[in-house]
Image: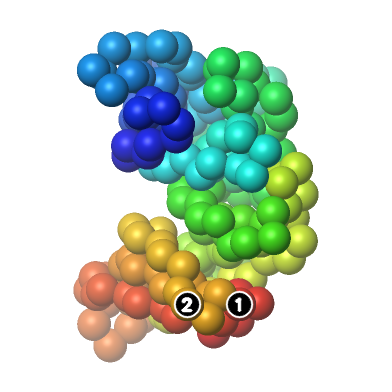
Amino acid sequence: AVNQVEDGNLLVGGSRVSTIDRSVLMKVNSQGEAIWTRYLGGYASYSGISGNTTLLSNGNYLVPGSYVPQDSVDVDERCFACLYCYSPAGDLLWRKDLGWGRWASAVLSRVAGDDEYWVSGGYYQVPRDPDAATTIWRVNNDGDTLYSRKYWYYGGEGAVNAATYGMDTTSDGGLVLTGMAREGVAGVEPYVHKTWILKLDQYGCL
């Protein structure tokens, strides 16, 4: 993802695949020259990061992603969905963990108004019904969770519901999210992928 922040500068997000996968955040100028580069995710970041960045009202950058502690006993699957806050100079100001789970990740963020922000992501659940459901968080300028909601279209083992491909705010203060919903193993059309669209109101309700 590429997001303009200030004075023609851009934040570019991606990933570096190696023995330890890391998410990469770069600030570049209008000519594409790197101002600074930061690696996110802790020990590893298998869930990755979209590179999406939201400009906070205080001028800092809100970056959704994931975090795996170095002492994690199960780094292959379990991590925190989290938020990072960076200053324009590239200093990490804080990291707030939203939830712990299998391949947990926060993916997208948008300004909600009144110094509040929408964040979307999710994680694989245990028990597995469904395997994956979309989670919506509403947070403040400090990254503190005000409330969260969880949504899925298909239930059951093997069902995956990822409304994290696109998110836009609407004139009524709500959200429209796009993504993919996949039926589980016992569905009418097992493992069939379908486009999924959600409309939420200003409280994050369906």
Label 2's element? loop
- Quadrant containing the C terminus is bottom right
Q: Locate residue 88, reporting x and y percent.
A: 56, 23
Q: Locate residue 108, reporting x and y percent.
A: 46, 51
- Quadrant containing the N terminus is top left
Q: Is residue 48 visible?
A: no
Look at 35% across and 60% down and name the residue there: 166
Q: Nearer the viewer, residue 79 or 52?
A: 52
Look at 59% across and 62% down and name the residue there: 112
Q: Locate residue 196, reporting x and y percent.
A: 33, 75
Q: Residue furthest bottom?
A: 188
Q: Is residue 195 visible?
A: yes
Marks 1 and 2, how far apart in space?
A: 10 Å
Q: Mark 2 or mark 1, which is nearer the start of the sequence?
A: 2
Which amino acid type corresponds to the residue marked 2 in the rendered image? Ser
Which residue is label 2 attached to?
A: 171
Residue 202: assigned label:
1
Q: Nearer the viewer, residue 145 or 105?
A: 145
